[in-house]
Amino acid sequence: MEKILFAILLTLTPITSSWAAIQTVKLDERPSRPGEWGYRPADGSVSQVNPPSFSWRPQKNLTWEIECARDKVFKNVAYRVEGLEFNVHCPPRVLEPGTYAWRYRGKDRNGRYTSWSRPRTFSVAPDAATMPLPARTELISRIPKTHPRLFLRPEDLGRLRGLARGRMKAEYEKLVAECDRILAKPPATTEPRKYPKDMVRGSEAWRELWWGNRTYTIRALNGAATLAFTRLLGGQEKYGREAKRLLLECAKWDPKGSTGYRYNDEAGMPYNYYFSRTYTFVNDLLTEQEKQICRKVMKARGDEMYEHLCPRHLWQPYSSHSNRAWHFLGEVGIAFLGEVEGAEDWVWFAANVFFNTYPVWSDDDGGWHEGVSYWSSYIDRFTWWADVMRAAMGINAYDKPYFSKVGYYAMYLMPPGKVSGGFGDGANRRRASQLVPLMSQLAAQAGNGHWQWYVEQMGGPKQTTGYIGFIRGALPKVEAKVPDELPASRLFRGTGQAYLNTTLKNANEDVQVIFKSSPMGTQSHGNAGNNSFVLWAYGQRLLTRTGTYYNYGGPHHRDWMWSTRSVNNITVDGKGQRKRNAAARGEIVAFKTTPAMDVVVGEAGRAYDPPLERFTRAVIFIKPDVVVVYDRLVAKEPSIYEYWLHAVNKFEIGKEGSVNVRNEDVGCDIHFYSRRELAFEQTNEYDPNPIPRVKLREWHLTAKTTQKRNSMEFITVYRPYKVAEGFRGHGGHEVIPGGYLFELGSTGGELTALLPTDDTVTLQTEGMTTRGAIKLKLERPGERTQILEVRKGDLD
C-alpha cells in the first residue's frame, strides 16, 4: 500500500509543478487614489517628452515588463523591456511621433506572470522634448571614477583654475575672503544635542533646537565645502587642512542622532549633501583610513534615506520634504559611487525620480501647488541637482518642458514690485524682488527674454554666490523681451490656479485676482480651500489669505490656516473643506481671457465634509477695476451659508449689503446682491490665535444667511480703487425664471450678465439667450460689443 501511494505521489509531482508554473499572479490594477502618482501616460494623453515616462501601481516581490505598440492588440510592438525593478520606467531611446498603446505585467520570483494590464493609449507630440534615460550601466559609466565629481569633473579643474586667475578673479577673491573668515572663527563641531525627553514637539523651545541644529550643521559642513573647493582652485593648503578637520570632526556625529535624517531631516539633509561635497572636494588630502571613516558614516546615512524614499516615492511622491531629499540622496550616491555598497542604487533611484516623477507639484504648465515660497526654495535647491547631473552624467535637466514655462509662474503671480504671493504657506512674506536670483538662473538656462525682462525690472540679474556661483560662472547674456504680446492673465491648470491681471509690468498699477480650485486638493503646504480668491490692487493687499505660518501643524496652522474660514470662501453650517487632504479636490472647469474681460469658474462641492451637491464659483473680472463673484451652492439638507472675507484692516459695514475696506491709499467697495437676508459681523481674532510673540491681527468678515435653505446664490461685486481718485459705477440684479439678470457699470464698460440658477431653463434678455451657461455682454465706448458665453470645459 505504501509503495502504491509513493508511486502515485511521484506521478503527480511533475503535474503539480507544471500547474504551479502556469498559475498567474493577480495583477493589482485598481485606479489610482488621491496622493498617488497614477498610471502614466494616462489614457488619451499627449506626451510632450519623448520618450514618455511610464508609471503603474506597484506590487511587492515582482519585476516588470512593458510593451508599447502601434496597435491595441500589440502585433506591432515598437518597444519592449523586461526585468524592471521599479514601477516606473523611462526608455533609453526615443519613439517615433504618433499614437501608441502600452501595457505592463509582473513576474514573481518563481517565474509566474500576472495577466497583462488593460491597454492605455497615448500620443507622442511631433515637437516633444527629447529626454531618454540612459540605461543603468550607461548612466553609471558616465560618472567620473576619481574625484571631484559633484558640480565638476576632474578634467574641469584646469579650466576653473584659469578662471580664478583671470576673468573670475574677483569671484575667486570673494571665496578666499570667506575662507579667511572661516579660519578666523572656525565653526563649532561638537555634536548638536537631541531633544530632551520632556520637550513638547512643536513648542517654541523645540523649534529653536530643531531649526538651530540645521543652521549649526550648515555652518560646519558648508564651511568645510567652501574651504575645500577654494583650495582646489589654488587656494592655500591651510584651507584644505581645515576642511579635512571639520569633515572628520563631523564624521564623529551619530548617524541616527540629532542630525539623523529620520530624527530631524532639516539637519540630516544638509549634513548629507554638504558632507558629500566636502568629501569629494577634499578627497586627495584624505588617507585611506580617513576615507573609510567617511564611507562608513555615509553608508549608514545613505541607507536611511534610501529606505525611507525607495520605492514609496515613485508611487506616492506628494510629500514636501521628500521632494528635495531624493536629489540630495543622488548627490551622496555620486560622491560615494564605487566606494560604498548601495551608492549605485541611490544614483539610479534619483535618476528615475527625475525622469519619471518630477516635478510633482505641477504639470508642464509651470505652476506650483505649494505656493511661491516653497516654489522658490525647492526649485532653487533643485538647480544644484541640475548642475550635478550635467557635470556627472551629461543630462540637461532644463530640457524638461516644465522648465520652459517655469518662470511664467513668477511673472503672473508676482509682477515686478509685488509684495505677498497668494496661496501657500509662507507666501504672504514673499516679495517679487526675492525671486530675482532664481529667475536670473532660470532665464539664463532657458534663454527666455521675458524672464530676463522680469529680473531687469528689479535691478537686473543676480549671480549665485559661493562655490556654486563660481562653478556656474558668469551668466550668459540674454536679451530682454517686454511681455507686450503675452495675455495679462493665465491659467495654470495642473495646479488649479488662475492669475488675473490688468498688467504684468508693474504691481503698483496692477489689479490682480488669484483664484484656486485645485485637482491636488488641500494637501501639504498648498492647504488653502478650493474656490478661494485673493484681491490685490495698486500695490496693496485688499482681500487676503490670513494667519501666520510659524509652526507646521501647530494649533494656529492646523485649526485656522487649514480651515476654509481663513480664506475668502464659504462655509456651510460652519463646516468647510477637508483639511490638508489630497482628496479635497477642486477643479477649474472654465477659463477665458480677453484684453477687456476674464472669467474663471471653479467647482469645489466634493471637497467639503460632508460633500455639497455643488459649489460653483465664477469670477468675472471687468478690467481694470470691477470683479464680480457669482456663487451657486447646493447642500444635501437645509443649511446656513457663511460667506467669509478677510482684510488687513477693519471693514466698514454699511447698509443693504454694502461694505468697504482700505489699506493705505487703496480701497475696495464691496456690495452683496442677494435675495436672501444676510447678517454681517466681523472680528480680528483668529480661532485659535497664534502664540503670544506673534502680534499680527487681521480682520475677518462673515455675511451669513439667517434662514436654512438647501441652496444659495451670492452675487458679490468688488470695486478696487485708489483713495485719491475714488470709484464710480452702478449695479443691480433682477430675479428671472431660471436665474438672474445682472447689470453693472464702471470705467471698464457696461456689463449685462445672465447668471443661471437652473441649468435646464433658457435665460434671455435683449440680444442674448443662454441655457446652463453664464453669458456676458460688455459694451465699451468706441469699441465693438463683446459677448462671451462660458460653459464647463471652455479652457483657453
Image (spheres, helix red, strand yellow):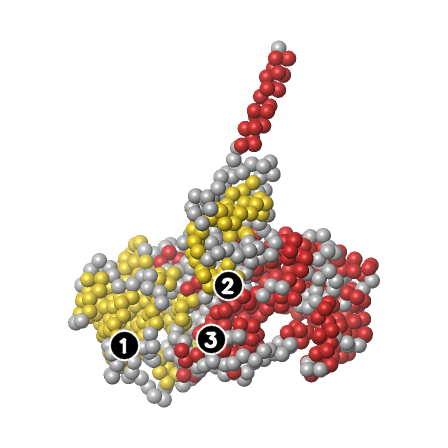
Mark 2 — residue? 129
**Of labels 2 and 3, the one closer to you:** 2
Image height check: is 217 above or below 452? Answer: above
**Of labels 3 and 1, the one closer to you:** 3
Q: SS of the residue at dot 2?
A: strand
Ranked by sequence position, the earlier of labels 2 and 1 is: 2
Ranked by sequence position, the earlier of labels 2 and 3 is: 2
Q: SS of the residue at dot 3?
A: helix
Left/right placement of residue 434 relative to residue 341 reads left
Ranked by sequence position, the earlier of labels 3 and 1 is: 3
The quadrant the C terminus occupies is bottom left
Q: SS of the residue at dot 1?
A: loop
Q: CA distance from mark 2 to mark 3?
A: 24 Å
Q: Which mark is residue 655?
A: 1
Dot 3: within a 10 Å radius of its alpha carbon, few (fewer than 14), some, or many (20 or more) residues? many
Are the residues tagged 2 and 1 within 8 Å (C-beta)? no
User: Amino acid under label 2?
Assistant: Ala
* Residue farthest along the top direction in this orientation: 1
User: Amino acid under label 1?
Assistant: Lys
Q: Which mark is residue 50?
A: none
Tell which of 96 and 509 is nearer to you. 96
The residue located at (45%, 61%) in the rendering is 126
Mark 3 — residue? 411
Q: CA distance from mark 2 to mark 1?
A: 58 Å
Residue 706 appears in the picture as rendered: no
Residue 13 appears in the picture as rendered: yes
Tell which of 197 and 304 is nearer to you. 304
Q: CA distance from mark 3 to mark 1?
A: 39 Å
x and y percentages locating residue 639 in the rendered image: 31, 58
Image height check: is 295 above or below 765? Answer: above
x and y percentages locating residue 577 in the rendered image: 41, 59
The residue located at (55%, 47%) in the rendering is 81
